[in-house]
Amino acid sequence: MQQQEERNWALAMHLGGLAGMLFIPPAGNIIVALVLWLVKRNESDFLNHNGKEAVNFQITLSIVNVILNLIGMVNHWDWAWGRPGFHYWYVTDISIFHGTRGIIYLVNIIFSIIAATKAHNGVLYKYPVSWRIVK
């Protein structure tokens, strides 16, 4: 594989997670990055490194989103009646958690673009906020 082709695939791995997040919100970010990494990981160490980094970063962001969704569901539980319900905290709670998820999406956009740019330049990049699950 030529060096430029290798760099393009690494760029696609990082931007694939971002594209997956936009088009298949629940888990597309993980699926796209994972599929690209699984297909290309044996072709070079550079692609293997970039793919693992992209997958780990997308998994980390998805875990944070799940946690925020669970917190949001708990906050919207009407404890007095023991059932889901709307109460006077609804407006503030929902705006706080949507704002937090918006920050997660913004972090994904920023760091995916940085990683894609570094990969396209042939630099091995490590996301600063990533739980290294795939080794």
Image (cartoon, rainbow, N blue to C red):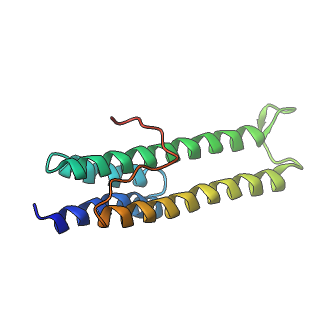
Residue beneath the point at 44% across and 65% down: 113
- Residue 77 vertical placement versus 113 (above, below): above
Residue beneath the point at 14% across and 50% down: 43
Res 29 → quadrant: bottom left
Residue beneath the point at 52% across and 63% down: 110
Q: Nearer the viewer, residue 128 or 110?
A: 128
- Residue 116 vertical placement versus 56 (above, below): below
Do we see residue 23 in this rendering? Answer: no
Where's residue 20, x and y in %?
40, 59
Where's residue 50, x and y in %?
31, 51
- The quadrant the N terminus occupies is bottom left
- The quadrant the C terminus occupies is top left
Res 119 → quadrant: bottom left
Where's residue 73, x and y in %?
69, 41
Res 64 → quadrant: top right
Left or right position of 28 against 68: left
Do we see residue 70 in this rendering? Answer: yes
Where's residue 121, x and y in %?
31, 66
Left or right position of 90 against 36: right
Residue beneath the point at 86% across and 47% down: 87
Q: Nearer the viewer, residue 94 or 65?
A: 65
Q: Nearer the viewer, residue 112 or 45?
A: 45
Please state the total of marks drawn on the protein image.
Answer: 0
